[in-house]
């Protein structure tokens, strides 16, 4: 009985809006994490080439 009272009082739209907000926030946070990892991989690749050049050089 309390569930029916809660649904009629708050409306069904509140839960749908909350779920959509959670999906949007999850997608945004996932995109931020992927962007940070992409940047870190790019920096690591640049420094890997530089380290390889220093290791294979003739001068110690």
Image (tube, rainbow, N blue to C red):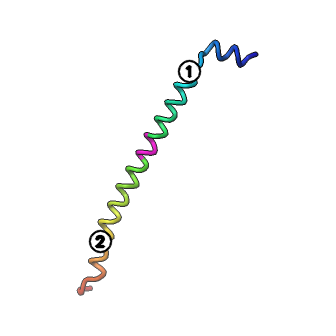
| Residues packed near mark 1 inside 10 Å, few (<14), some (14 to 19) or many (20 plus) | few
- Mark 2 lies on residue: 49
| Residues packed near mark 2 inside 10 Å, few (<14), some (14 to 19) or many (20 plus) | few
Point 24% across, 87% down: residue? 58
Q: Which of marks 1 and 2 is nearer the N terminus?
A: 1
Apparent side of residue 24 relative to residue 16 in the rendered image (left or right): left
Could you tell me residue 18's position as x and y percent? 54, 27
Judged from the image, the secondary structure of the residue bearing numbered disc 2 is helix
The magenta region covers 28-32
Point 55% across, 19% down: residue? 13
**Residue farthest right in this picture:** 1
On screen, residue 60 above or below 35: below
In this view, the residue in front, 59 or 41, is 41
Quadrant position of residue 41: bottom left
Quadrant position of residue 1: top right
Q: Residue 14 carries which label?
A: 1
In this view, the residue in front, 8 or 25, is 8
Is residue 60 within the magenta segment?
Answer: no
């Amino acid at each position: 009985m309390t569930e029916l009272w809660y649904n009629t009082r708050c409306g069904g739209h509140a839960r749908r809006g909350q779920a959509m907000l959670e999906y949007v926030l999850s997608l945004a946070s996932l995109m931020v994490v992927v962007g940070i990892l992409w940047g870190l991989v790019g920096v690591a690749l640049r420094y890997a080439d530089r380290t390889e050049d220093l290791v294979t050089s003739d001068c110690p």
